[in-house]
Image: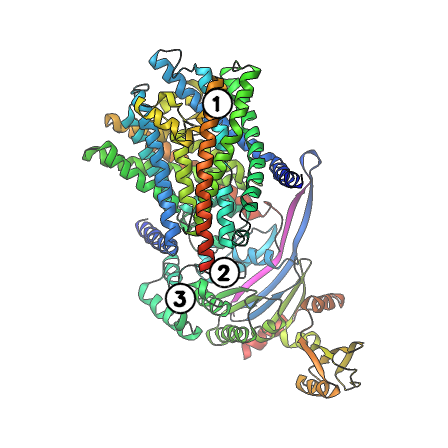
Amino acid sequence: MTFWRKYSFVGLISARSNLAYFGDVVSRVLFLGVVLYIFLRLWKVTYAETAVQTLGGLTITQMLWYLTVTESITLSAPRVAQVVDEDVRTGSLATQLVRPLSYPLYRLWTTLGERLVRFFMNVSVGSLIAWILVGALPVSAVGLLIFVLALPLAFVLDFWANFLIGLGAFWLEDTSGLLLLYSRITMILGGMLIPLELFPRAMQPVLRALPFSSMVYGPAHLLVLPSLNELIELVLRQGTAIVVIVLFVGIVYRTALRRVYANGG
Amino acid sequence: MLPKLISYLTLAAAYVRFNLKSQLEYRGAFLSQVAAMFINDFFWVIFWSLFFTRFPVLRGWNVKDVITLWAVTAAGFGLAHALYGNGLFLPQLIARGQLDAWMLYPRALLSHLLLGRMSATALGDAIFGFVAYLLMVRPDLPHFVLFTLLTMSVAVLFVGFSILSGSLSFYLGNAEGLAEQWRFSMITFSTYPTTLFDGAAKLLLYTLIPAGFVSYLPVEALRELSLSHAALAGLGALAVLLAGIAVFYHGLGRYESGNLMEMRG
Amino acid sequence: MKPAVKLASLHKTFILKQGKGFRRTQAEVVAVADVSFVIPEGQSVAFIGPNGAGKSTTIKMLTGILHPTAGEAHVLGFTPWRERSKLAYHIGAVFGQRSQLWYHLPPRDTFELLARVYNLDKRDYVKRRDMLIERFGLSSFLSTQVRKLSLGQRMRAEIAASLLHRPKVLFLDEPTIGLDVVARQELRDLVREWNREDGLTVFLTSHDAGDIESVARRVIVINHGRVVLDDKVSTMRRQYLGSKVLSVKFNELPARIDISGVAVLKASGYALKLEVDTQVIAIEKVINVVLKAGPVADITIEDPPLEEVIAHIYSQGAGSSFAADLEEELNTA
């Protein structure tokens, strides 16, 4: 019982500290306003030029809401990689290596807390803007539930990827390049700017299999076109990816531990 | 007039040399920053390539046009802030009273202080711009010459814009956030085809957010090898630069009367 | 003799905005009120006062960074805030918080850059630079990055850099702060040498009494925006800087100390605080007496804090200006 209480308390604290920045909200509004407006123009023109009602199965309204969610997800990306990188460099991680579980779990809880708040803020602001631009998205309570269920593992998966990048600090002088690469790959291959259905046909199955789309395209697509089958598939894919990456993190941890002991900590 | 110009060019050359040398002290971080921006820009080009695979023409623009857009914007922005890196730090310099140190030198204040820093990421942008244009658009000589001239025009505009947005700090206490938002909007709009926008938005793009002079006129100039478009782009750039300089020196008057902020010491 | 610096009724008020939104009020804060003095060329002046007294405001007006609300000033014949660029060729400045030297580059690179900034003739610059290197003893670390230098080395290079363009007036702000005893003395000697031998007018701000005594001939004290004392350092030393404070901790109860020139400020248990008038008795004599008074665990020798001295001065009323006498003295010297 204390385990859960401890970590949820930590999550709450970090969530609350994120709410404190009002100026942050304003800048979010401006950012999302600009970006979603531009996307709307881009897709409106595209729909008009191809003279269709739906592209990739989405109407223009659904398209913009899709993009709102993908942007909200991407924008709420956690700073875990930077934090872990710093912990590695200052040596505070090295002291935690002997109790391997507590550090990642601690980070996981704080990250999830932060992320949920930021995502909620982004999606609230984004929804308002999307509503102004294209009107409301027809969505049922079940549909909304399906969407919400797609999020937790997506965030957990993203956390582990970022965590892994942070661990790169054991070997690299600077992990920010790796982080940038990861965020850009997620952006493209994850379907942040275009839904998977509009990619070249040959690429689509590959993209679906890769973990990136499970974090971005997956949940967003479920909001605009909810489907229970799709949700189940997505959750399975998310789960598999998490298992794989956690195993990998374990290996990296063990190697890092050896390195720390070799270098005298 | 001429000796003054030569004296300034010699000064600028010295600053470039020493800024570069100073950056190369941390070679790893420097190169990774340069590479990071290069990669970032490259990914956007990938996105557009994928987009145009599915939708070959957008209001008369094809993939080469959008790549040209990115090339000229990146190269111009990069050139501007590789040389005048302090343009990005103007709000901080003003807010922290760091203009004082520059005012003790026997040089025109603005053109001197801008030289004080070189942005490594801007260098990445500049390199990307030229590489992308040469390799992906494959221009003939006349086009390449025009491209280089337009890059300089865009650079002039970005310098002016940085000065303009940075000088807000003379008038508003903590203008860092605002200046940043304004800059972000400018850069974002500059990287999307202006052809997407109509009416009021289009007007905005030639006034408050002068992205039109960066993303429309230069591209049109290169598409048709049109000197009139190029001239308009240059005029717009000049206008923004003059506006920036005017606002800066007006704000400087307030700074010199000291009624800007709390007294120090 | 031509004055290097001439201030007449210099005034500076700031309008301080307080509060937010509708409850915004404006308060006028007088930073500098009716400050006047004349500094002849080649004089070294210590310009001191507590924090917030108006020192940096005055210096900013003298260097052209700030416009005064009223009054006149001429530095080397220029009105600073109107002819800032032209004046800049003839003044040098070493301000504590700001370093002119590029952190990741060796001092020699900064020198080269400054040569371009000040538009110095190549041959002239090389000769001047080499002379400065020799006199400031920079050759051993000229090609070492500034971030690797000790504070003492950095300050020497800093001052040398500020003299590259042959300024006639040098503004120094807290130059010895953070330096060890040896480096401090080295720096003071260098500045004094330049003042005495090269005729550099020195305008020094410092909280260190040793700086003032060592470098300056004249001291101007400013408090609450007004000149409170304008006198020769020797006079000030006689009246206010002539004492040292000795704090001693013994291991057992010490014998009584009763000699002329030494006043017991505090005596509690094994600790003793003495004020020594160094005009009456040499400090080493006092130390000898102290060492004989009992086994000493710890001993500290300090100057009385400058703030105290200034408060003391101020409480005795504004001092009259002996500047005219001083100028005459320098002219006949």
What is the three-letter code of the residue carrying label 2?
Answer: Gly
| Cβ–Cβ under 8 Å for marks 3 and 1 | no
Q: Is residue B242 visible?
A: no
Calculate the distance from the C-alpha at mark 2 to the C-alpha at mark 3. Answer: 39 Å
Q: Which chain is indicated by disc 2?
A: C
Considering only vertical position in the picture, is A217 above or below A107? above
In this rendering, which labeled residue sits more in front, label 2 or label 3?
3
Percent x, y of residue B103: 48, 53
Q: Nearer the viewer, residue A173 or C139?
A: A173
The residue at 64%/48% (across/down) is C14
What is the three-letter code of the residue carrying label 3?
Answer: Thr
> Which residue carries the number 1 mark?
A232
Calculate the distance from the C-alpha at mark 2 to the C-alpha at mark 1. Answer: 84 Å
In this rendering, which labeled residue sits more in front, label 3 or label 1?
1
Q: Is residue B167 left or right of residue C13?
A: left
Q: Which chain is indicated by disc 1?
A: A
Considering only vertical position in the picture, is A121 above or below B116? above
Quadrant of residue B64 within the rendered picture: top left
Calculate the distance from the C-alpha at mark 3 to the C-alpha at mark 1. Answer: 64 Å
Magenta segment: C1-19
The residue at 52%/57% (across/down) is C63
Percent x, y of residue C278: 69, 82
> Which residue carries the number 2 mark?
C77
Considering only vertical position in the picture, is A171 above or below C201? above
Q: Residues within 10 Å of mark 2 (few under 14, many from 20)?
A: some
> Which residue carries the number 3 mark?
C144
Q: Residues within 10 Å of mark 1 (few under 14, many from 20)?
A: some
